[in-house]
Amino acid sequence: MARSPAEGKLKFRNFQLQESTMKKKLFISIFSVASIFILSFTGKEYQKNIRSVNRFTTDTLFYMCQVMPGPEVAALSPFGNPFKSVEPHDQMDGYTGCHYYLSSDDDYPQVDITLTDFGTAAEARVSYNIWVESFHETFGRNPDTITGLCDIAGFAGNADPALCDICAVVALSGRYRITVGFKGYYSKITADQKKTSGINIVKALLRKEPFLVTKK
């Protein structure tokens, strides 16, 4: 049975990992941090508004939707669909993100990019380890290890390692965590294709914002 657009959006936005550490339950979204989408831009209106804002927020993290514009993300995505619209995440202290919708007649392809500043590399690593443990508890295996990307990186999909509807690349660079999530085309586009696209999006962000790159 065909899914409604609303259902597709809801499942993507509310997808969460239930994680336990020190007997406490932490709910860390793989794609956002309690984000409420307050703005939506399309076409010329999107370009006009993105250009009108300052590049950096008051806490020095940039606006993700400006640094990674919709048409570029659509071109880097695995879906091959044109850009439709974008919704910035709520900008919070140490957090920035953007949600991208692509045009399609047979699914609801979406991309989500977030950046979280944990303050220290140690805290960032704790968050990564919790994510790995939670995925292992759910699916009985660890996320795929991605070599040569940031300090450590992985890819998490669904029960079937070859296919995923909701999946993400998570990469740590020092105190920063970058998450690139995808939704859509479960059987049409493989998990490997989505992983490769996520890696390329992370690399594009690092090229644009070199302060995110850990100095060796």
Image (cartoon, grey):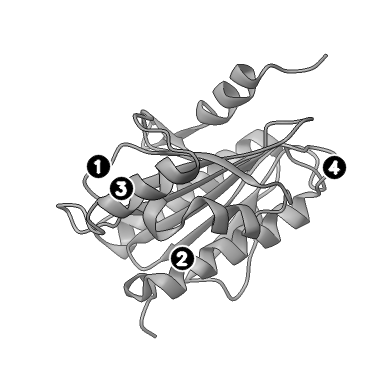
Residue 188 is labelled as: 4
Q: Secondary structure at mark 3?
A: strand
Earlier sequence position, callout 1 versus callout 2: 1
Viewport quadrant of the N terminus:
top right
The quarter of the picture where residue 76 lies is bottom right
Q: Where is residue 6 shown, x and y percent of the image?
A: 59, 18
**Residue positioned most to the top:** 1
Tags 3 and 1 touching, CB below 8 Å: yes
Check disc 1 and give the amino acid type.
Met
Q: Where is residue 55 shown, x and y percent of the image?
A: 26, 59
Q: Which residue is mark 1?
A: 92
Tags 2 and 4 touching, CB below 8 Å: no
Q: Which residue is mark 3?
A: 95
Check disc 2 and give the amino acid type.
Leu
Label 4 environment density (alpha carbons within 10 Å; few <14, some 14–19, many ≥20)? few
Q: Secondary structure at mark 1?
A: loop
Earlier sequence position, callout 3 versus callout 2: 3
The quarter of the picture where residue 209 lies is bottom left
Residue drawn at x 62%, y 72% is 147
